[in-house]
Amino acid sequence: MRKFKTVFMRGGTSKGCMFLREDLPEDRSQWDPIFLQVMGNPDPKQIDGMGGTVSSNNKIVIVWKSEEKDVDVEYLVGQVIVGKSQVDYKSNCGNMTAAVGPFAVEEGLLTITQPITTVRMLNRNTDKYINVTVPIDPQTGTFAQDGDCHIAGVDGTAAELKVNFLNPAGSKTGKLLPTGNVLDVLDIPGFGKIEASILDVSNPMVLVRAEDIGMKGTELPEEINSNTEVSALLEKIRGTAACMMGFAKDLEDATANSPAVPKVGFFTAPVTFTDIAGEQVEASDMDLCARVISVFKCHKACPLTSASSISVAAQLEGSIIEKTLGMPGNASGCVRIGHPSGVMTMYPDIVRQDGELKLPGVAVQRTARRIMDGTVYVRQ
């Protein structure tokens, strides 16, 4: 069997295999068969690989030193599609972005500064720049694993990483508002018209009200995934937005060839609910409550790139969130999003310049951890 060096890492609420580009074949056409075997595809149980049967546990990240000025490392994310012989490179993964900083530090890809090293990164899925602040352990001179930072969806605490997505608008479409509208009315086959906001912040996303699709907005992933009628409707909404943004020619094409872009989500007003760990999440701890579907399944925790879009929508006058809830957030500029694993706090930086909306950055608090490193084996 062929063997490749890899590091298995958790980044935020996702996990997957990190590869140095130099350890992979130069011929990129060989990559997908390797990554599919690494995760155990196309078997949906992924019994013969590292995959965790849901999209958030099926990430591939390829990292290399950058030759660009003011950039330390570049990276590319592959989303292995569970149950298929398909790897999707259309979008970045915000959670695994948090892992790239510590990985780069631990692999010696840049010069360390104490007590904090800012890793300047370029994501090659979106050609967007991200800075990740990585705390350094003074004794080991590398990533400080331990800390008191807790993020929803991950047990225990770890060192805080601040992930700042720089100028994240227009990652795939070139525009913050791909349709040119803060609010759109979508015509959904077999359903009718529905209001939505379509944004492209780190990753494209379409947002609708929970109540408009017959949901409360507090449902947990299993309940959403087992609701075939709502799942089919959400996929039609997602597919319609994909067509409007130019990612697909029709709904069937969107499902088959653009399953990860855009994401689709629904939201409601702050409400107390029980999370997937059985803990009560208080309405007073959030500014809105949201659920996000990615690759046909509801995420157990809000994807970071989706949280970026949601937080920006919350601060945009005329968006579906602002129209429904007013402008959620507080004086510190943060937007707190309730999701199936708890609450995520986002810091969108929106400015108006010469009558135009600008988005210098969106930051979030994350943690990451090296779980295992070694060699992964694939068949010839």
Image (cartoon, rainbow, N blue to C red):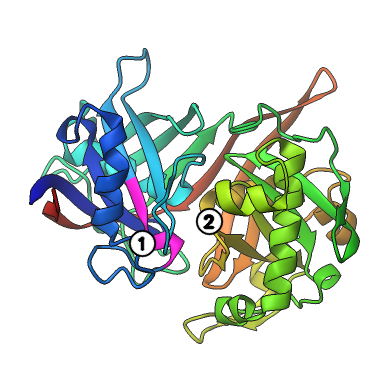
Where is residue 120 drawn, in percent x and y? 37, 28
Q: Which comes sooner in the sequence, label 2 or label 1? A: 1
Cα distance, mark 2 to mark 1? 24 Å
Which is more toward the observer, 30 or 79?
30
| Residue depicted at x 70% and y 29% | 175
The reply to whether the magenta stretch includes residue 232 is no
Whether residue 172 sits left or right of residue 214 in the image: it is left
Q: Nearer the viewer, mark 2 or mark 1?
A: 1
| Residue depicted at x 42% and y 50% | 86
The disc at residue 303 is 2
Are discs 2 and 1 less than 8 Å apart at CB? no
| Residue depicted at x 67% and y 41% | 248
Where is residue 302 drawn, in percent x and y? 55, 61
Type of amino acid under label 2: Pro
Residue 173 vs 221, above or below: the answer is: above
Numbered range of the magenta stretch: 54-60
Where is residue 363 drawn, in percent x and y? 53, 43
The residue carrying pointer 2 sits among few (fewer than 14), some (14 to 19) or many (20 or more) residues within 10 Å by Cα, namely many
Whether residue 270 sits left or right of residue 306 in the image: it is right
| Number of numbered markers | 2
What residue does disc 1 label?
42
| Residue depicted at x 49% and y 38% | 164
Type of amino acid under label 1: Pro
